[in-house]
Image (cartoon, grey):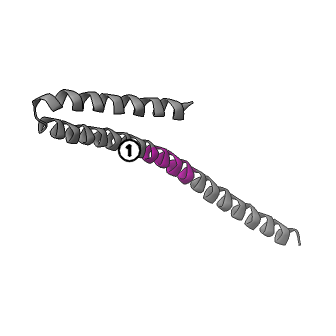
Amino acid sequence: MDSKIDEIFSSLRQRIKSVIGLYEDQKSRNSELLKKNEELNERIASLENKLEDLDKKYENLKIAKVLSSVPGEEVHTTKLQVNRIVREIDKCIALLNR
């Protein structure tokens, strides 16, 4: 009877060790995945910033192209209008940031 109980306990210990091993493996894998997820999120944020910068540059190029095609006297007036619009946009952004 004692030997049967010993066998049961031995088997139970083996299974517990196996479950603990599996748990440690999954815990390690989870940690790796969390780290990878954080790296990917940082990369996404960086790429979004680059995209935003490129969008701004593209818009500036479009404005520059329009301005370069405007005849002499109208350039000054157009530049003043663009500056006014930019100031208004800056005010709106400032209000949104409050």
Q: Residue at 70% of width from left, 63% of height from top?
A: 14
Query: In the image, is 88 to the left or to the right of 96?
Result: left
Q: Position of residue 65 (x, y in %)?
A: 16, 40
Q: What quarter of the picture does the N terminus occupy? A: bottom right
Query: In the image, is 15 to the left or to the right of 78?
Result: right
In the image, residue 65 above or below residue 16: above
Identify the amino acid type marked 1. Answer: Glu
Q: Position of residue 79 (x, y in %)?
A: 23, 29
Q: Residue at 23% of width from left, 32% of height from top?
A: 78
Q: Nearer the viewer, residue 74 or 34?
A: 74
In the image, residue 50 above or below residue 37: above
Q: What quarter of the picture does the C terminus occupy? A: top right
Q: Position of residue 72 (x, y in %)?
A: 10, 30
Q: Nearer the viewer, residue 29 or 43?
A: 43
For this orientation, the residue located farthest to the right is 1
Q: Secondary structure at mark 1?
A: helix
Q: Residue at 46% of width from left, 29% of height from top?
A: 91
In the image, residue 71 above or below residue 9: above
Query: In the image, is 91 to the left or to the right of 82?
Result: right
- Does the magenta run of residues contain 74? no
Secondary structure of the magenta portion, mostly?
Answer: helix
Q: Nearer the viewer, residue 95 or 84?
A: 84
- Does the magenta run of residues contain 35? yes
Q: Position of residue 80 (x, y in %)?
A: 27, 27
List the residue tagged with mark 1. Answer: 48
Q: Nearer the viewer, residue 47 or 61?
A: 61
Q: Residues within 10 Å of mark 1 (few under 14, many from 20)?
A: few
- Magenta segment range? 28-41
Query: In the image, is 84 to the left or to the right of 29?
Result: left
Q: Residue at 31% of width from left, 28% of height from top?
A: 83
